[in-house]
Image (tube, helix red, strand yellow):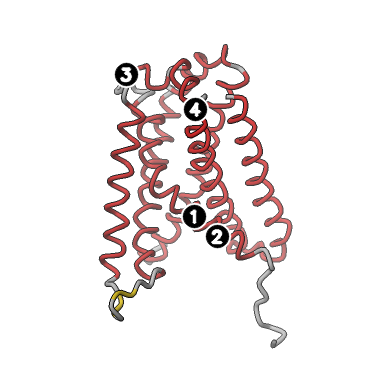
Amino acid sequence: MSNPRYLLFFLRECSAFFLAVFLGELLCRFWILAFRPERYAAWLEWSKAPWIVAFNVLALAFACLHAATFFKAAATILVVRMGGRRVPGALISGGHFAGWAVASAVLGWLLVRA
Amino acid sequence: MPPHAYRAHPTEPFFWALFSSGGMVAAMLMPVVILVLGILAPLGLVPASVESAERLTALGGNWLVKLFLLVLIVLPLFHVMHRIRFILIDLGLKPLRRPIGVLCYGTAFLGSALTAWVMLRL
């Protein structure tokens, strides 16, 4: 763990656990809406518990770490050639980060608009 | 082929394709979903109507939204279970790689079926 590269690798792998649990949360929310709508209000109250929100803050941090490492890896994995020359990796990963910003803005707006 | 050479299982390309597409969906979309539904809404930093039963049920009635939610949950699910599979193998459970594969991908398939069922009922 004293090696920074190995620590980053380990943290990136750990992101799978947090994402898996949040996916379970998401599925649980819609399962209750579909099959037990009378219990949804109680579920919303439970989701406000400090430890749940704290877990989700960690999940967000790990989700961002996953995204950043995934987009950086894209620069190595994706070989794009234009005019016979390879497109620089920085442009590949930069394009991914830009797409992430746009997707987040659009989806965020769709989620919060009343 | 030398006896010590790695032999990929025929299903490997299928699960690696799901891993990469799931990783892209998780990377692009999960952070904002976690932020809004997991943090801002419970803290009351967005209007309560954002996660109200009426709004989510009305949205969930739209087939495009159902399809979006299906993709949002299923593809990242395969991504994380594929990653967890290799975490367990790297932790020394290589002799159990077959049962681990069955457990991890089985969980992903089960989760996918459950998600599809929920979307059909929403």
Label 1 is found on which chain of the structure?
A: B
Amino acid identity at mark 1: Ser
Label 2 is found on which chain of the structure?
A: B
Give the image quarter of residue B70: top right
Kindly identify which numbered label has been placed on residue B47. 3
Asked if labels 4 and 2 share a chain, the reply is yes
SS type, badge 3: loop
Label 4 is found on which chain of the structure?
A: B
Asked if labels 1 and 2 share a chain, the reply is yes
Instruction: Measuring from the top left, give residue A107's x and y in whole percent.
Output: 35, 37
In the image, taking residue B111 as reference, residue B66 lies left or right, namely: left
The residue that mark 1 highlights is B21
Q: Which numbered disc, 4 or 3, marks the residue closer to the eye? A: 4
Q: Residue drawn 45% across and 58% down?
A: A10
Kindly identify which numbered label has been placed on residue B17. 2
Instruction: Measuring from the top left, give residue A87's x and y in whole percent.
Output: 29, 72
Q: Quadrant of the C terminus of chain A?
A: top left
Q: CA distance from mark 2 to mark 3?
A: 38 Å
Amino acid identity at mark 2: Ala
Q: Quadrant of the N terminus of chain A?
A: bottom left
The residue that mark 4 highlights is B62
Q: Which numbered disc, 4 or 1, marks the residue closer to the eye? A: 4
Amino acid identity at mark 3: Pro
Tell me whether the residue at label 1 lies in contact with that at label 2, contact meaning CB atoms closer than 8 angstroms: yes
Q: Residue drawn 67% across and 63% down?
A: B11
Q: How busy is the neighbourhood of tag 3: few (under 14 within 10 Å), some, or many (20 plus)?
A: few
